Image (cartoon, helix red, strand yellow):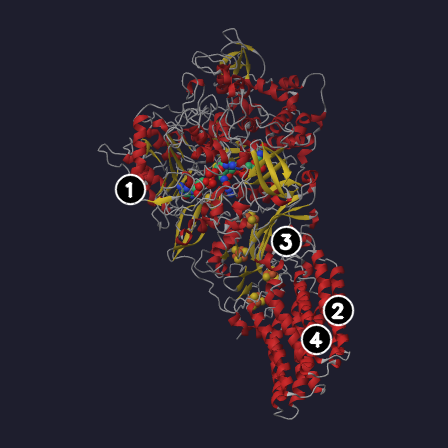
Amino acid sequence: MTSLPEATSKKLGLVIDLDTCVGCQACATSCKEWNAGGYSAPLTDQNPRGRDPHGTWLNRVHSYEVGDDAQSRTVHFPRSCLHCETPACVTVCPTGASYKRASDGIVLVNPDTCIGCKLCSWACPYGAREYDTDDGVMKKCTLCVDRIYNETFAPEDRVPACVRACPTGARHFGDLGDPESAVSQLVKEREGFDLLPEMGFKPVNKYLPPRARRDQTAASAPQAAEQAVDNSSSLADRFFAWADRSLAR
Amino acid sequence: MHPAYSVIVFTTASGAGYGLLIWLAIAAALNLVPHDPVLGFFGLGVALALITTGLLASTLHLGRPSRAWRALSQWKSSWLSREGIAAILTYVPAGALGLGWVFGEFVPGQIAAGAWLAVPCALGTVWCTGMIYASLPTIRAWDQPLVAPVYVVLALATGGVLLILLLAVFGYDVRWAAVVSALTLALGWFLKARYWLAIDTANKTYTAEAATGLGRFGTLRPLDPPHTQPNFVMREMGYQVARRHAEKLRRLSAVLLFVLPILAGLVLLLDLPSWMQIAVASLAALSTTAGVLTERWLFFAEAEHVVMLYYRGGAA
Amino acid sequence: MLNREPDIALSEPSADEIKTTTCYMCACRCGIRVHLKDGRVRYIDGNRDHPINKGVLCGKGSAGIMTHYSPARLRAPMKRVGPRGSGEFEEITWDEALETATGWLKDVRARDPGKLAFFTGRDQSQALTGWFAQQYGTQNFAAHGGFCSVNMAAAGLYTFGGSFWEFGEPDWEHTQYFMLFGVAEDHASNPLKIELGKLKEKGVKIVAINPIRTGYGAIADEWIGIRPGTDGLFVGSLIHELMRAQKIDLEYLVRFTNAHWLVIDDPKGAGDGLFARDEAGQPLAFDKVTGALADATRTDIAPALVGTFKLPDGRSGRPSFALIAERFLTDEYNPDKVAAATAIPAETIRRIARELAHAAFEQQITLDIPWTDTAGRRHEKTTGRPVSMHAMRGISAHSNGFQTCRMLHLLQILLGSIDCPGGFRYKAPFPRPTPPPNKPARAVGPNAPLKGAPLGFPQGPEDLLVDSGGKPQRIDKAYSWDAPLAAHGLMHMVITNAATADPYPIDVLFMYMANMSWNSSMNIPAVLRHLTAKDERTGEYKIPKIIYSDAYSSEMVAYADLILPDTTYLERWDCISLLDRPISGADAPADAIRQPVVAPDRDVRGFQSVLLDLGARLRLPGFVTETGTPRYPGGYPDYIVHHERSPGIGSLAGFRGEDGKSYGRGAPNEKQLDAYIAGGCFHEHRLAPDQRYYKHANKAYLDWAKDAGFIGTSAPITFQLYLEPLQKFRQAARGHGAIQAPATHRTRIEKYFDPIPFWYPPFDGAPGENEAFPLSAITQRPMHMYHSWGSQNSWLRQITAENCLYINRARAQKLGIADGDWVWIKSPLGRVKGRVRLMEGVNPDTVWTWNAVGRRAGAAALDVDAPEATRGFLLNHLITELLPEREGGYRFSNSDPITGQAAWYDLRVSIEKAAPDEQGETWPQFVPLKRPVLADAEAAA
Ligand SMILES: Nc1nc2c(c(=O)[nH]1)N[C@H]1C(S)=C(S)[C@@H](COP(=O)(O)OP(=O)(O)OC[C@H]3O[C@@H](n4cnc5c(=O)[nH]c(N)nc54)[C@H](O)[C@@H]3O)O[C@H]1N2
Ligand SMILES: Nc1nc2c(c(=O)[nH]1)N[C@H]1C(S)=C(S)[C@@H](COP(=O)(O)OP(=O)(O)OC[C@H]3O[C@@H](n4cnc5c(=O)[nH]c(N)nc54)[C@H](O)[C@@H]3O)O[C@H]1N2
Ligand code: SF4
Ligand code: SF4
Ligand code: SF4
Ligand code: SF4
Ligand code: SF4
Ligand SMILES: [Mo]
């Protein structure tokens, strides 16, 4: 399946809101937890109690600071596979284990045919492919393909584990190929963007930028009355004169 | 990029093997060497052994070597798949050439046909190897027009040095081989120098700000990593070699890979006793081997992957 | 063939069975669904119906599997066989363990029950553990509140009968302006995240006041990088500005607070600063209608808020509000004056005050909800000032936290925004009367239970637990002159005090779920010495016996003599009770249970059941029947259902009565737990619309709450802007009354027990004052780790296996320190080595690190060279447990002088680059702990 489908009927993906993500790691651990027993099982860990613990995770959350001094911001940044439309991770794959599904655009690895050559991880600019050393095959975000169509689940649970868990509601799932979908609308409204568009991989997942800060509001301008200082009496006297009124209990 | 030994051994060994194969094929086709079965046996034996060792080493790099055969299926899009196919295809003419050379021709023109077909196959295989790297836009140091040509020329150069040694051992005239090798080495040096210049001056087009889309707020600096100990991506793509150290290694590899073998080639033009010829050719072979291993190590170690922008910030 | 997409199983069931229970990866208590497959936990997700988390799950909760299956789990009861701290244990049977404990405890109870100190850390069953202490007869009981956030609890409960912490929440739906003070993660972990996400969606402005900008601060609209310990100046300055702009809700004040109560002005007299009262003891106010004094609680008066009035006895009195206004209108709280100390520009303070006033007064909300007040007046609409605030340990973990927190409540109340639409709202069982009526119980004597619960709320010197010489009667010195309002005790002082016999030695220390030899103590090297100190004469340990219940091989396990291994949270019954720390929302009181979803595969028992067993073996009243047989032979679930605190009131409020139809009060119901399980392991009672707001003065609510057993009376709850109990202590320090403060404590009480909130510099040095230790050093909770529990989870420790010291970039440059350098962090107590990371979003005078990431080598079944031990570090080693000597050589604990709250965040340090050969490893290093016997056979081998 190394050749990409001409077009996919859907473009399922995630929309991640950098304005509300607090970096809680719920999307990372819920992803690990779901997938460690699901389609991607096993998701192994190396040295879990030792000096150098690491393992296969399909979703990782960075935190950054952007800008200098007072103008700077802290931004939390979850990163997983973007299910690109024209990803080289698929075309470089020598075995066809890496493929993009024609029906919904999900990029998957077939764990039964992957030889673990790691070339796809070299081809992915987004660091979304993680080689499982113990399992000998490549792993990546599956968009929780074994959840989103799972007929044993209640309909509202047919969403990726990370979306289901995210406490702040910073993660959205849907069809980005349908301009009418809620996610497409959200992207439009909030000017969602692609990561490294120059790379030409056409990511399906979109990121919503941090909103402009409202550190000044309409209310924050000094009011005229407040500014007109009456110097004839002390602050306390003025206040007491104001507070000395008839107040019903 | 992490310089994996299996990959370094693979590219250097198979490169030299294909280079030697090509030279022997040309020599056979043009009758530059006598069709001495012992020479053929050892010459092509060494070439094919190097190729095979390389290919086997490359499977060590795989998580599931037993499934390696699956890598032949995606020739339409994958350079790795193409390389595999080309490598296997090369065995056919190379085998024909070898059998003809060692045991005598079974069919008329077998040696010439095998020789002439082996050359493009071997060149193609090495070209594919180069293209595996050269086709990755994620790694600026590899996404360069000179990458595949350098692979090919270095294969020819390292194979050429082996050919000299072979001829010397068998007591045949080495002069033509010395000239050809020296010329290929010189070309290799020229191309590699151009390559180094290119990667040193190429614009770092990708930035952490673009990678995250956060450039509108200013310079981006990582605060907390996703995981405090290095993960697969960081181990695989995050290898870094200090600039000063890399400079030194570049000079070392240039001396070992180009300067000394070229000098050796020139020396071999002199009328030397055979033991000295063998000694000089051996030194040249050792030097090229060390040089090409260093060059290959640097090829990985100096290559920066854009994904590290997410981990380190900056540009790539 | 190769080119066809493979068929994949899209509808694999996630479980053979899904069971609901309550998460305990942190104290937030979210509802979870545990997916069980082939007898193992396959996956955990959030329960969508649950009031706390509404289906979402945080980073810890989603990693629950790895805590449940942690190789650090203890396997069986153990007795110590090597020296304390060595970690050498031998497994014993439960019978032997319980008999040993019973023997020790029986003996102590027969001599002096107070020689048992029972402290229960991160307990969620204090209704039971407190009752055990009471029936046993020891006053020496508390849980973790004293080192956690008692400043917050006490300040709120004494002031308005509720609190931040988990006793209330903003009216998320209606609020228009939200201020978050000193919160990194909170006990309301998921609720905060859910609601912050929604506020962002709605465009409600969020202001984070925090020296550090991470997590919630990162998504706030405005981050105010305040200097630690100076919030009182900032808040006072906001009050100053609001008063200057005359943006105070006076109507609200006279209706719900003691603003109009007259305070006696009689400088030399015994009554100075107390409220003027009539014969019936009712407070007096000046009624502007009649021009005479009147019972201030009457609703038919128009009370004066300013003026000086003659009292019947000739003294004069002033409305407390006038005194308060006077304080905040002084120049001391002028934005220009506080800007330098707080590191907040004066203009920012003025602007925030304007924004607050705008939201409160220009964006007033009116809901179509009629309600009736306690005077019987019906209001057709419910109006509110949509300004809300939340605060936690950034405020409370300072030695000025009580007063600062009171000031925050004062600000809320001046704006009229407590329990109104858009404001801060109570969660049942709050509000409770102010000040809370229950008092701490006193020791009675051998073999006798206490007459009441050990913890309570003193209202004056007469309620203190001190002997006639003023000496503390509790081991932690709670309710003594050291910390009169120590409503949660001072668990952080127990080990130190017991080992130094100050005020006296004890016989048995019994602890549960607190890592007291590591991350929950101050000055760990000293604590470790105390735990192993021996009496030179007898050769016995100074703390002779230590019993401890933990579920994992924590640092504390190594220091105990007898280990009672607990289950994991998925293996036991638990009760999240309205008698303790419930999970109510503002609109709906709620409680919950934990049910065992998997059976333990080791010889471990739920601690609560063990405690009931111990109580029965000790034949404690209430734990045995008349015939002496165990009263709750079925263990904790038996107790949860059948125990009645008072007739009809028990652990769970839902499904009471024989038919299971009563709420709050009702006979025990045999089917109660089944009913909870059927409902997702929680029960929610939705309040009627007319009960939802102004609960402190809402007749329908208060009547109902009294019926449900939440409160003893349905009288309105009056906000204590002016806190008279503090003045009573002050008067005692001035030499008035029968019980007077000892001379050593008088200046301290005089200074800090101000009935009007004020700011004073934290004890460990005022900002900018301390040349030798110029930086504040604080910690934050990482959202994905829970104290030291996190690092024994094999997934969570991959996210954070080591911590750094974060320093402001510009400041570090001045100090010549680069990113990645190793530095010495020094305090007067000692030094710790850590690696530096530079950042912009931190106050330049502040350094910080993630809390409780550093572990002792060998703990938690980690390899000895784990980064937690070799590179991770704790600031706790640098935090002194005792303040420098005062007059007479006395050393007060490093705590708030009023409540005894541990002042973790007062720490001040200096930073110095480590030498080149000192890079790469943390310091101090302790002797690695031997691994006790663990659940994981491999780990034990
Ligand atoms: N520097 C600094 N120090 C601090 C703080 C700070 O902010 N900065 N915060 C303070 C505060 S607020 C707190 S609350 C304390 C917290 O400190 P601790 O209360 O000590 O918290 P934990 O490290 O979680 O340790 C609790 C113990 O409970 C055990 N445990 C876990 N699960 C179970 C279980 O199911 N059953 C039993 N029986 N045991 C279990 C763990 O193994 C651990 O040994 O730390 C305090 N220390
Ligand atoms: N993930 C996770 N959740 C937890 C816990 C955990 O360990 N991990 N622990 C639980 C426990 S026991 C508790 S007590 C709660 C505590 O919950 P929080 O109160 O959120 O706890 P801290 O992490 O101590 O956060 C204190 C915050 O106050 C800031 N701060 C420090 N000094 C000042 C100051 O002077 N002024 C202001 N304005 N801010 C200041 C710090 O920068 C920090 O952001 O969390 C609970 N929830
Ligand atoms: S993000 Fe990477 S792995 Fe995912 S589709 Fe794009 S290139 Fe492939
Ligand atoms: S690692 Fe597996 S999926 Fe990736 S390119 Fe190689 S064979 Fe394909
Ligand atoms: S969609 Fe599923 S696999 Fe992908 S990041 Fe989210 S949880 Fe992980
Ligand atoms: S779960 Fe949501 S808030 Fe938490 S890190 Fe992931 S995207 Fe951010
Ligand atoms: S906040 Fe997280 S860890 Fe805490 S109870 Fe909820 S899900 Fe569990
Ligand atoms: Mo706490």
Q: Is disc 1 in the same subunit as disc 2? A: no
Query: Residue reaching furthest top?
Result: C314
Q: Earlier in the sequence, mark 4 or mark 2?
A: 2
Which is nearer the eye, A133 or C773? C773
Label 4 CA crowd tier, 10 Å (few <14, some 14–19, many 20+): many
How far apart are the two marked residues, 4 and 3, measured between alpha carbons?
Answer: 48 Å
Q: Which residue is mark 1?
A: C95
The correct choice, above or below, for B237 with respect to C630 in the image is below
Q: Amino acid at mark 3?
A: Tyr
Q: Residue at x 50, y 17 (%)?
A: C744
Q: Which of the labelled discs sits on residue B259, or is there none?
A: 2
Q: Is disc 4 in the same subunit as disc 1? A: no
Q: Amino acid at mark 1?
A: Asp
Label 2 CA crowd tier, 10 Å (few <14, some 14–19, many 20+): many
Left or right position of C657 against A18: left
Which image quarter: residue B289?
bottom right
Label 3 CA crowd tier, 10 Å (few <14, some 14–19, many 20+): many
> SS of the residue at dot 2?
helix
* Dot in front, 1 or 2: 2
* Dot in front, 3 or 1: 1
Question: The disc numbered 3 marks a residue on which chain?
Answer: B
Q: Which of the labelled discs sits on residue B310, or is there none?
A: 3
Question: The disc numbered 4 marks a residue on which chain?
Answer: B
Q: Earlier in the sequence, mark 4 or mark 3?
A: 4
